[in-house]
Image (cartoon, grey):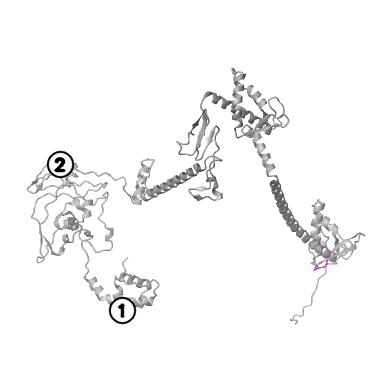
Amino acid sequence: MADARGEYWYFEPGTDANKITVPELRSILLKHGVSYRSSAKKPELVGLFNDVVAPQAAQVQRAHARTKRSTRGITDVPSSSASTATTEDTEDETLLAPPPESARRTTRRTTRGSTAESELPPTRAKTPSRAVPAKHSRGMEAEADERPAVRRVRKSVTPAVKEPSPEPEAWHRSDATSPFTQDNPFQSGSSPTAPETATRDRRRRTTGFEQKERRKSEANRRRTFQSNSEQLDEGVVVPTRDNFNPDIKHEDQDITEEFTPEEQLELVRDRARAGEVDILPPRRRKNGSKATGTLKAMSGTLLLTAAAVFGGAWRQEKVAVGFCGVGRYPTGLAGLDIPEWASDILPTCEPCPPHARCYRDLKLECDTDFVKKAHPLSLNGLIPIPPTCEPDSTKTRNINNVAQKGVDILRERRAQYECSEPDHQGNPVESPEVSEADLQRQMGSRKRKGMTEQEFNDLFDRALPEMKMKDEVVESIDATTGEQRLASTSLAKLPIVCSVRRSLQQSIRQYFLQIIGIMLFTLTVWYGKYSFTDRRAMEARAKQLASDVFDRLANHAALSIQEPGAYPDKGISMTQLRDDVLRNEFSSSRRQKLWERVQKKVEFNSNIRAAVRTTTSGDVARMWEWTGPIKLLEDGRSSGKRQSGRFSLGMDSSPPAVNDMQEVQKWDEGRPIY
């Protein structure tokens, strides 16, 4: 906002710098490019003003006096990218008026994307011509303009004054429905502009001088569509069919067009009024940066490399450990020692499979009638899983089946023994061991039909050594009969309920002392907490009861003084007071503990006298008497004048007698007495 005093009011004669406010001084210094400290005080600012700004007064006023008001309104300044050679001084240019021609002028307008222009009625030509319908007025906008004036640059010649040519009335007509206006908000408060006709005429003409001042960016943004062919006949442009149908290049709207917040809001409202579901424009998808993708690829590569190195080291150590009893003890991975807490990642030895002779590096050889069979998950030796020895003939497979049946019978026997269940005949199982004869008899009862006794005995004799070779089968000899007995240590045949019960029993037997210690510790902690809280509660209650006892004794002492006939005893029996205070406590032990605390607190008080006395009723009891200060009671229970032993037990006292109501007179000397 302009200052009413003027732009350089502080250069006026008689202006005192000391009377200028600090904000104005800061503004003046910034205006003239004088730097100062942010914490500078007014004396420092005044000194800078007098030393730097004040000497520039004459120079600034001379430059300001040369400045003249502009009568041209807003001037299109050429961009900095334009060549300086194309801009010439307007004072040195002389525009020669073109020869008078009778050419018909048409309005030249620039087309915009979605701005609708009102159709202008065609002007009447001076020469007789065919009438053109109004529908061709938009096509005629693309006609060529008149010939440009010849320009001569001559500094000695006085510039010719351009006289405005008469314009059609339609150019000056202001329609209420037109989206354009002649008001310029940027010219408010500026110098008065030239008449509108001259300005519009200058804008409407296309001369060589104006072509030089046009910015390069304007050439891309504002284009006028000109017809492909023109027909000139004595200065008159004759319209053709091509003039009415110019080739307009329709540019597709870019889907990534950005909008201002106001345009965005208007677009959303238009879509909402149109009933579209997705009223918001599609959002741009953020393209992932190459750095993020590279980082992820590098991280994945490092993880895969680390996993491959660890897998290779683990496989090498697994092969070195080999079979149990043949290989070595695992110590580390790739020569690195592994601590005890991470020893679970070390590989363990594998048991030697049956019918095989095991060697180092997980190598083995199978017995006769057995072939080595690789594990399906070993991936041809890539994963260190040891192979097994499988039978190579039908008879060998039958022997293995019989051996497996015998092992199943031994497992069932172990399950019956562990769960205390009877056998198939209903007899209790006293031992998990089974003799060879009983085992053969039980297996013979389960043989398939069609098998002779001789075939079964032959298979059993050859399967018995196979059963004894199992790790879970334990062989023993009966001391009385001398026969061999077999038992299985496997618990695979145990029912779920029996397995859980057996596991609990074994855990209790194994950790019996620890369980007892934990239970005792828990009970001790709980009892300690209970005793502590109970003692705190009893102590708090004892303090409250002692306070009640003090109130009772104090009140009793006051009543015995006010009404000695009604209260002849100055103290109260301790036992009577106990039964009165603890009337809601029925536990004798708790009453005793609680009253011991109360008695200790009461008798340790210096205002209480404890003594064994004989009451008025003749009972000998321990009496508590209040010996401290006494406050007279004013609760209406005594009249304060009765001295006899008679007293009323009613709620309301009787009214005083007339004789007792006496007027108290006091002599007043009428002067102050010292």
Please identify the quadrant where the N terminus is shown: bottom left
Image height of 645 relative to 267, above or below: below
Outermost residue to the right: 618
Quarter of the image for residue 249 reads top left
Residue 14: give its label.
Answer: 1
Is residue 283 left or right of 537 when viewed as pictured? Answer: left
Q: Secondary structure at mark 2?
A: helix
Instruction: Indicate the position of residue 164 as horizontal and vertical percent values.
Output: 15, 57
Residue 242: give its label.
Answer: 2
Main SS of the magenta part reads loop
Image height of 650 relative to 488, above or below: below
The amino acid beneath tag 1 is Gly
Residue 639 visible at all: no
In this orientation, which residue lies closer to the viewer: 140 or 411?
Answer: 411
Is residue 127 left or right of 664 when viewed as pictured? Answer: left
Magenta stretch in the rendered image:
625-629
